[in-house]
Image: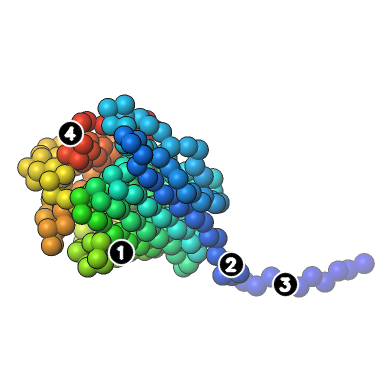
Amino acid sequence: MTSHWPQPPATYALVQPRQAEARCGRFELAFSRHGARTHLGRQFVCYPFHMTRPFALDRAIPSLLTVYQQSSSGGLYRDDRLTSRYELGAGAAAHITTQAATVVHDCHGQPAHQVTEIVLEENAFLAVTPDPLVLFPGASSSSSIRARLAPGAVLLLSDAFTCHDPEGRLRSFDRLGSDVSIRDAAGRLLVRDNLEVSGADIAGPASPIGGWKVVSNFMLLGDPTRLPAAEALVALNDMASAIVGVSALANGAGFGLRCLAADAIAARSIGESLFELAVAAAFGIQPAPRRK
Protein backbone atom coordinates (compact mmCIF):
# COMPACT_ATOMS: atom_id res chain seq x y z
CA MET A 1 0.00 0.00 0.00
CA THR A 2 1.40 3.36 -1.00
CA SER A 3 0.60 6.56 0.85
CA HIS A 4 0.95 9.93 -0.86
CA TRP A 5 1.79 12.71 1.59
CA PRO A 6 1.73 16.35 0.52
CA GLN A 7 5.20 17.68 -0.15
CA PRO A 8 6.45 20.36 2.26
CA PRO A 9 7.32 23.78 0.89
CA ALA A 10 10.96 24.49 0.14
CA THR A 11 11.17 27.01 2.98
CA TYR A 12 9.19 27.56 6.14
CA ALA A 13 8.25 30.91 7.70
CA LEU A 14 7.64 30.98 11.42
CA VAL A 15 4.55 33.13 11.74
CA GLN A 16 3.30 34.01 15.19
CA PRO A 17 -0.15 35.59 14.96
CA ARG A 18 -1.04 38.53 17.13
CA GLN A 19 -2.38 37.49 20.50
CA ALA A 20 -6.14 37.70 20.74
CA GLU A 21 -5.80 39.52 24.06
CA ALA A 22 -2.73 41.29 25.36
CA ARG A 23 -1.47 40.12 28.73
CA CYS A 24 -2.40 42.89 31.16
CA GLY A 25 -1.03 43.32 34.69
CA ARG A 26 -1.53 45.93 37.39
CA PHE A 27 0.62 46.88 40.37
CA GLU A 28 -1.06 49.67 42.30
CA LEU A 29 -0.04 50.84 45.77
CA ALA A 30 -1.15 53.73 47.97
CA PHE A 31 0.97 54.83 50.95
CA SER A 32 -0.02 57.11 53.81
CA ARG A 33 1.80 58.60 56.78
CA HIS A 34 0.58 57.86 60.30
CA GLY A 35 2.69 59.42 63.04
CA ALA A 36 6.35 58.67 62.37
CA ARG A 37 5.65 55.75 60.05
CA THR A 38 4.46 55.14 56.52
CA HIS A 39 1.84 52.44 55.99
CA LEU A 40 0.67 50.65 52.89
CA GLY A 41 -3.04 51.13 52.39
CA ARG A 42 -5.00 50.42 49.23
CA GLN A 43 -3.30 47.91 46.96
CA PHE A 44 -4.11 45.93 43.84
CA VAL A 45 -1.60 43.42 42.44
CA CYS A 46 -2.36 40.90 39.69
CA TYR A 47 -0.43 38.54 37.41
CA PRO A 48 2.31 38.72 36.33
CA PHE A 49 3.17 40.99 39.26
CA HIS A 50 3.70 39.70 42.77
CA MET A 51 4.45 41.35 46.10
CA THR A 52 5.13 39.83 49.50
CA ARG A 53 4.98 42.71 51.96
CA PRO A 54 6.63 46.09 52.54
CA PHE A 55 9.87 46.16 54.55
CA ALA A 56 10.96 48.72 57.15
CA LEU A 57 14.70 48.46 56.48
CA ASP A 58 15.74 51.79 57.96
CA ARG A 59 15.34 51.99 61.73
CA ALA A 60 16.61 55.55 61.71
CA ILE A 61 14.06 56.51 59.01
CA PRO A 62 10.77 54.91 60.16
CA SER A 63 8.80 56.80 57.51
CA LEU A 64 10.62 54.99 54.66
CA LEU A 65 9.12 51.70 53.46
CA THR A 66 10.73 49.44 50.85
CA VAL A 67 8.73 47.30 48.41
CA TYR A 68 10.15 44.70 46.03
CA GLN A 69 8.13 44.49 42.84
CA GLN A 70 8.33 40.88 41.67
CA SER A 71 7.19 39.02 38.57
CA SER A 72 6.25 35.37 38.22
CA SER A 73 6.33 35.34 34.41
CA GLY A 74 10.06 35.22 33.64
CA GLY A 75 10.28 38.64 32.02
CA LEU A 76 8.50 40.81 29.47
CA TYR A 77 6.92 39.29 26.37
CA ARG A 78 5.34 40.53 23.17
CA ASP A 79 2.33 42.80 23.53
CA ASP A 80 2.49 42.84 27.35
CA ARG A 81 0.49 45.74 28.82
CA LEU A 82 1.67 46.34 32.36
CA THR A 83 0.60 49.25 34.55
CA SER A 84 2.00 50.48 37.86
CA ARG A 85 0.56 53.28 39.97
CA TYR A 86 2.00 54.76 43.16
CA GLU A 87 0.18 57.27 45.34
CA LEU A 88 1.91 58.75 48.39
CA GLY A 89 0.08 60.90 50.91
CA ALA A 90 1.57 63.92 52.64
CA GLY A 91 4.86 63.06 54.36
CA ALA A 92 4.82 59.40 53.27
CA ALA A 93 8.02 57.80 51.93
CA ALA A 94 8.63 54.66 49.88
CA HIS A 95 11.27 52.89 47.84
CA ILE A 96 10.13 50.64 44.99
CA THR A 97 12.73 48.31 43.52
CA THR A 98 13.05 44.83 42.00
CA GLN A 99 14.85 41.68 43.11
CA ALA A 100 16.83 41.35 39.88
CA ALA A 101 17.08 42.45 36.27
CA THR A 102 14.11 41.92 33.93
CA VAL A 103 14.56 40.02 30.67
CA VAL A 104 12.73 41.35 27.61
CA HIS A 105 12.21 38.44 25.21
CA ASP A 106 11.83 38.51 21.44
CA CYS A 107 8.61 40.46 20.88
CA HIS A 108 8.14 39.56 17.18
CA GLY A 109 7.24 43.14 16.28
CA GLN A 110 4.71 43.57 19.11
CA PRO A 111 6.38 45.70 21.82
CA ALA A 112 5.90 45.13 25.52
CA HIS A 113 4.35 48.23 27.10
CA GLN A 114 4.89 49.49 30.63
CA VAL A 115 3.02 52.49 32.04
CA THR A 116 3.77 54.01 35.44
CA GLU A 117 1.67 56.71 37.12
CA ILE A 118 2.94 58.54 40.21
CA VAL A 119 1.17 61.04 42.50
CA LEU A 120 3.12 62.59 45.38
CA GLU A 121 1.45 64.86 47.90
CA GLU A 122 3.22 67.47 50.04
CA ASN A 123 6.64 66.41 51.41
CA ALA A 124 6.30 62.85 50.13
CA PHE A 125 9.37 60.89 49.01
CA LEU A 126 9.49 58.14 46.40
CA ALA A 127 12.41 56.30 44.80
CA VAL A 128 11.61 53.98 41.88
CA THR A 129 14.83 52.09 41.10
CA PRO A 130 14.25 48.84 39.19
CA ASP A 131 17.21 46.78 38.08
CA PRO A 132 18.10 47.05 34.36
CA LEU A 133 16.15 45.61 31.46
CA VAL A 134 18.11 42.86 29.69
CA LEU A 135 17.22 43.14 26.02
CA PHE A 136 17.34 39.79 24.19
CA PRO A 137 17.52 39.60 20.37
CA GLY A 138 14.27 40.90 18.88
CA ALA A 139 13.20 42.55 22.15
CA SER A 140 10.99 45.62 21.86
CA SER A 141 9.97 47.68 24.88
CA SER A 142 8.03 50.90 25.34
CA SER A 143 7.66 52.61 28.71
CA SER A 144 5.78 55.69 29.85
CA ILE A 145 6.09 57.44 33.22
CA ARG A 146 3.75 60.23 34.27
CA ALA A 147 4.35 61.87 37.63
CA ARG A 148 2.78 64.73 39.55
CA LEU A 149 4.62 66.33 42.47
CA ALA A 150 3.19 68.58 45.18
CA PRO A 151 5.38 71.16 46.97
CA GLY A 152 8.10 69.63 49.14
CA ALA A 153 7.95 66.22 47.40
CA VAL A 154 11.02 64.35 46.12
CA LEU A 155 11.11 61.74 43.35
CA LEU A 156 14.03 59.59 42.19
CA LEU A 157 13.57 57.67 38.94
CA SER A 158 15.97 55.10 37.51
CA ASP A 159 15.81 53.48 34.08
CA ALA A 160 18.60 51.22 32.78
CA PHE A 161 19.19 48.63 30.10
CA THR A 162 21.78 46.27 28.69
CA CYS A 163 21.88 43.88 25.72
CA HIS A 164 22.43 40.13 25.73
CA ASP A 165 22.35 37.35 23.14
CA PRO A 166 22.10 33.97 24.95
CA GLU A 167 23.53 32.25 21.87
CA GLY A 168 26.56 34.55 21.69
CA ARG A 169 25.86 35.52 18.07
CA LEU A 170 25.81 39.29 18.77
CA ARG A 171 22.22 39.65 17.57
CA SER A 172 20.60 42.92 18.61
CA PHE A 173 17.27 43.88 20.15
CA ASP A 174 14.58 45.57 18.06
CA ARG A 175 13.64 48.89 19.68
CA LEU A 176 13.57 50.62 23.05
CA GLY A 177 11.50 53.70 23.83
CA SER A 178 10.61 55.70 26.91
CA ASP A 179 8.60 58.84 27.62
CA VAL A 180 8.80 60.59 31.01
CA SER A 181 6.56 63.55 31.92
CA ILE A 182 6.84 65.42 35.23
CA ARG A 183 4.19 67.92 36.32
CA ASP A 184 3.54 70.01 39.40
CA ALA A 185 0.44 69.70 41.56
CA ALA A 186 -1.45 72.13 39.31
CA GLY A 187 -0.69 70.04 36.23
CA ARG A 188 1.95 72.35 34.75
CA LEU A 189 4.54 70.45 32.71
CA LEU A 190 7.99 70.78 34.27
CA VAL A 191 10.09 68.24 32.39
CA ARG A 192 9.61 65.81 29.53
CA ASP A 193 12.31 63.31 28.56
CA ASN A 194 12.10 60.97 25.57
CA LEU A 195 14.29 58.12 24.39
CA GLU A 196 13.97 56.13 21.17
CA VAL A 197 16.77 53.84 20.04
CA SER A 198 17.10 50.76 17.87
CA GLY A 199 19.30 47.76 18.47
CA ALA A 200 20.95 48.30 15.08
CA ASP A 201 22.00 51.79 16.18
CA ILE A 202 23.45 50.49 19.43
CA ALA A 203 25.36 47.70 17.71
CA GLY A 204 26.57 49.74 14.73
CA PRO A 205 29.90 51.49 14.24
CA ALA A 206 28.38 54.84 15.21
CA SER A 207 26.91 53.48 18.45
CA PRO A 208 26.11 56.27 20.93
CA ILE A 209 27.35 54.08 23.79
CA GLY A 210 30.55 52.78 22.19
CA GLY A 211 31.97 49.84 24.10
CA TRP A 212 30.03 50.48 27.31
CA LYS A 213 27.65 47.70 28.36
CA VAL A 214 24.99 49.24 30.62
CA VAL A 215 23.08 52.48 30.01
CA SER A 216 21.37 54.16 32.98
CA ASN A 217 19.18 57.26 33.05
CA PHE A 218 18.21 58.94 36.31
CA MET A 219 16.00 61.86 37.26
CA LEU A 220 16.13 63.39 40.74
CA LEU A 221 13.24 65.79 41.12
CA GLY A 222 11.48 67.96 43.63
CA ASP A 223 12.08 70.45 46.42
CA PRO A 224 15.64 71.79 45.95
CA THR A 225 16.10 72.03 49.72
CA ARG A 226 15.68 68.23 49.90
CA LEU A 227 17.96 67.38 46.96
CA PRO A 228 21.72 66.72 47.00
CA ALA A 229 24.06 69.49 45.91
CA ALA A 230 25.17 69.38 42.29
CA GLU A 231 28.77 68.91 43.44
CA ALA A 232 27.84 65.70 45.25
CA LEU A 233 26.23 64.34 42.10
CA VAL A 234 29.20 65.28 39.91
CA ALA A 235 31.46 63.46 42.40
CA LEU A 236 29.81 60.19 41.35
CA ASN A 237 31.91 60.46 38.22
CA ASP A 238 35.08 59.15 39.87
CA MET A 239 34.89 55.49 38.83
CA ALA A 240 37.11 54.16 36.07
CA SER A 241 34.41 51.67 35.08
CA ALA A 242 31.63 54.25 34.58
CA ILE A 243 31.08 57.78 33.35
CA VAL A 244 28.29 60.05 34.60
CA GLY A 245 26.90 63.26 33.16
CA VAL A 246 24.85 65.62 35.34
CA SER A 247 22.46 68.29 34.03
CA ALA A 248 20.14 70.75 35.72
CA LEU A 249 16.58 70.16 34.51
CA ALA A 250 14.23 72.80 33.15
CA ASN A 251 12.02 74.89 35.44
CA GLY A 252 14.24 74.16 38.44
CA ALA A 253 12.74 70.67 38.58
CA GLY A 254 15.95 68.95 39.74
CA PHE A 255 18.72 66.99 38.03
CA GLY A 256 19.08 64.54 35.18
CA LEU A 257 21.94 62.03 35.13
CA ARG A 258 23.14 59.82 32.29
CA CYS A 259 25.50 56.96 33.05
CA LEU A 260 27.47 54.53 30.88
CA ALA A 261 28.98 51.58 32.75
CA ALA A 262 31.39 48.81 31.81
CA ASP A 263 29.32 46.14 33.56
CA ALA A 264 26.35 45.51 35.83
CA ILE A 265 28.48 45.84 38.98
CA ALA A 266 29.57 49.37 38.09
CA ALA A 267 26.04 50.36 37.07
CA ARG A 268 24.62 49.07 40.36
CA SER A 269 27.29 50.95 42.33
CA ILE A 270 26.31 54.23 40.67
CA GLY A 271 22.61 53.60 41.27
CA GLU A 272 23.10 52.70 44.91
CA SER A 273 25.31 55.74 45.51
CA LEU A 274 22.70 58.04 43.97
CA PHE A 275 19.94 56.48 46.10
CA GLU A 276 22.06 57.04 49.23
CA LEU A 277 22.63 60.67 48.27
CA ALA A 278 18.92 61.20 47.63
CA VAL A 279 17.85 59.68 50.95
CA ALA A 280 20.55 61.51 52.92
CA ALA A 281 19.54 64.85 51.39
CA ALA A 282 15.82 64.29 52.01
CA PHE A 283 16.06 62.84 55.55
CA GLY A 284 19.53 63.76 56.82
CA ILE A 285 20.40 60.08 57.40
CA GLN A 286 22.11 57.46 55.25
CA PRO A 287 19.81 54.54 54.26
CA ALA A 288 20.55 50.91 55.11
CA PRO A 289 21.79 48.65 52.27
CA ARG A 290 19.12 47.00 50.13
CA ARG A 291 19.73 43.25 49.86
CA LYS A 292 19.12 41.45 46.58
Q: Nearer the viewer, mark 4 or mark 1?
A: 4
Which residue is labeled 2 in the image? 21
| Amino acid type, mark 3 | Gln
Q: Is residue 36 above or below residue 218?
A: above
| Amino acid type, mark 1 | Asp
Labels 3 and 1 touching (C-beta < 8 A): no
Q: CA distance from mark 3 to mark 1?
A: 50 Å
Q: Residues within 10 Å of mark 3 (few under 14, many from 20)?
A: few
Q: Nearer the viewer, mark 4 or mark 2?
A: 4
Q: CA distance from mark 2 to mark 1?
A: 24 Å
| Amino acid type, mark 2 | Glu
Which residue is labeled 4 in the image? 284
Q: Residue at x 20, y 40 (%)?
A: 282
Q: Residue furthest front?
A: 35
Q: Residue at x 47, y 52 (%)?
A: 27
Pinpoint residue 138: horizontal percent, then vertical percent: 44, 60
Q: Residue furthest right?
A: 1
From the viewer's perspective, is 21 left or right of 71? right
Q: Residue at x 15, y 45 (%)?
A: 227
| Element at label 1 | strand
Q: What number of labels is visible?
A: 4
Which residue is labeled 1 in the image? 179
Labels 2 and 1 touching (C-beta < 8 A): no
Q: Residue 106 versus residue 55: which sits nearer the camera?
A: 55
